[in-house]
Image: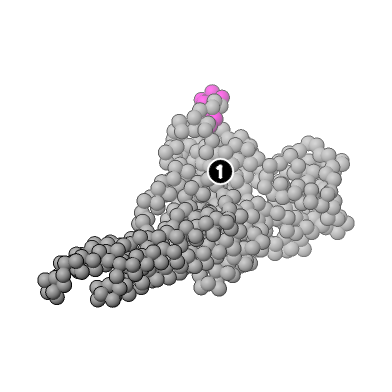
Amino acid sequence: MPSTALRVRDDGAAVPVPAAALGIGDLVLIRPGDRVACDGSIENGESSIDESPVTGESVPVLRGAGAFVMAGSINVDGVLRVRVTRAASDNTIARIIRLVEDATTSRAPTQRFIERFSAWWTPGAMAVSLLVILVPPVLLGWDWWTSTYRGLAVLLIACPCALVISVLAAMAAGLSSGARRGLLIKGGAALEKIGAARTVAFDKTGTVTKGRPRMTDLLPAQGSSEGRLLALAAAVEQASAHPLARAVLAEVARRGIAIPEASAQAAIPGKAVSAMVDGHAVSVGSLRHTAETGAIPDHLVETASQLEAEGKTVVVVLADAKVQGILALRDEPRADAAAGVAALARMGIRSVMLTGDNRRTGEAIGRSLGLETKAELLPADKLREIIALGSAGPVVMVGDGINDAPALAAASVGIAMGGGTDVALETADAALLKDRVTGVSELIRLSRATMTNVKVNVAIAVGLKGVFLATTVLGLTGLWPAILSDTVPRCL
């Protein structure tokens, strides 16, 4: 959230004020590149709004008069005047904070196996030791020295140190093993719960995808070439901060193409940008805007429609009103995303993608990875989905953004991508420092292996203590075997 906002006075002047001081009904000026400081309705102006920090929508969306804008989103290319509809204490970011707090406080603390066990083990052992000291001299004719010796041996055998150490040592080994591989886990309780997961819910943008669009298709028209098409597009887009413009410039840089000089740059927010390049009037615009002008041939419209069905954003490059070609861009999956989802499937774990992105793009990415997809979800919607998934068993949520924080807090275990926002890292129970989707299955395997070690350690400790407890009461073993029964499990 920005610390200040430009409030428009009655005389039309815009003066900076603290964002928290904005009240319902205030008129706020939002310039290109500004982060929106309030929830409100656009009074006048039109612009592309980057809502990815809040909703996860990977591509900026066009908003005009009467449309709602959310606090925390970014105004890309137009000047807007927004009427505040919610006070700072009730805007989108404030509501997300409350969702996180409510989800966190509603989670019951994990009751570790050894803590439940020790609730009756220690007092029970003391009672048995006391009985061994007091009862046999009265009922069995033992002398008091023998009963006291055997009672103290029983108490030593029953010491819970080996049990505690057997759990802590296994947990410490699991946590350190994860840390060496870039899997940071916030304590043993989280490590234990990860392995019990029945469902893993993924965010899309920045989690299973890289979080930024890249060029996927380059289709020059007849008489043009890929190099010329890219050069013209880059010349027009080089002064823009739009994510699609950055993707075009990145592709040009990768290919080493020289960018020609451009002048007279102009923009129709959310539709097209234009400039004069080498004496030609060049524009780069959306498929819909270009189709409205009638400048695009039918066969290219069909090709572009197929690309859009794959969840890609299509832009058309014109020079002197003639189509030079089309570019397709998409926020592509991480290189290991498919492998990560497949690894979870082999472990019998269901994978679901929860995204705020548009349904077309979300479902296209989901199909390519074999993920069940639920799209166009706001933070509160993701929270409800996590609660619903949790009814079928423990659920893990993997995300990286502000919009994921409530779901991360409500899940049985929240896992944040290491390159994500601070609020996601703070809310999550674990973090994948190397931003690998396969890290989720590694965490689950690590948790299961650690809990197997815990159970084996406890079984050895309890088994040895049980055997020596019986032999000590019967007088077959004495104090030294009792000491060994307490020490050996610690070493193991």
In this picture, residue 385 sits left or right of residue 126: right
Vertical side of 472 occupied by 356: above or below: above
Q: Is residue 373 visible?
A: no
Say which of 199 and 295 sits in front.
Answer: 199
Q: Quadrant of the C terminus?
A: bottom left
Say which of 191 and 82 sits in front.
Answer: 191
Q: How is the image coloured?
A: one colour
Vertical side of 243 occupied by 16: above or below: above
Q: Residue at x 71, y 41 (%)?
A: 240
- Pinpoint residue 207: horizontal percent, then vertical percent: 58, 56
- Pinpoint residue 393: horizontal percent, then vertical percent: 41, 67
Q: Was residue 10 drawn as part of the magenta stretch in this picture? A: yes
Q: Was residue 140 drawn as part of the magenta stretch in this picture? A: no
Vertical side of 432 occupied by 5: above or below: above
- Pinpoint residue 94: horizontal percent, then vertical percent: 44, 42
Residue under label 1, please give it: 73
- The stretch in magenta equals 5-13
Residue extending farthest to the left is: 138
Kind of residue at badge 1: Ser
Q: Is residue 439 visible?
A: yes
- Pinpoint residue 186: horizontal percent, then vertical percent: 47, 53
* Helix, strand or loop for disc 1: loop
Q: Residue at x 55, y 71 (%)?
A: 345
Say which of 470 and 30 sits in front.
Answer: 470
Q: Residue at x 63, y 38 (%)?
A: 33
Say which of 78 and 72 sits in front.
Answer: 72
Q: Residue at x 51, y 64 (%)?
A: 446
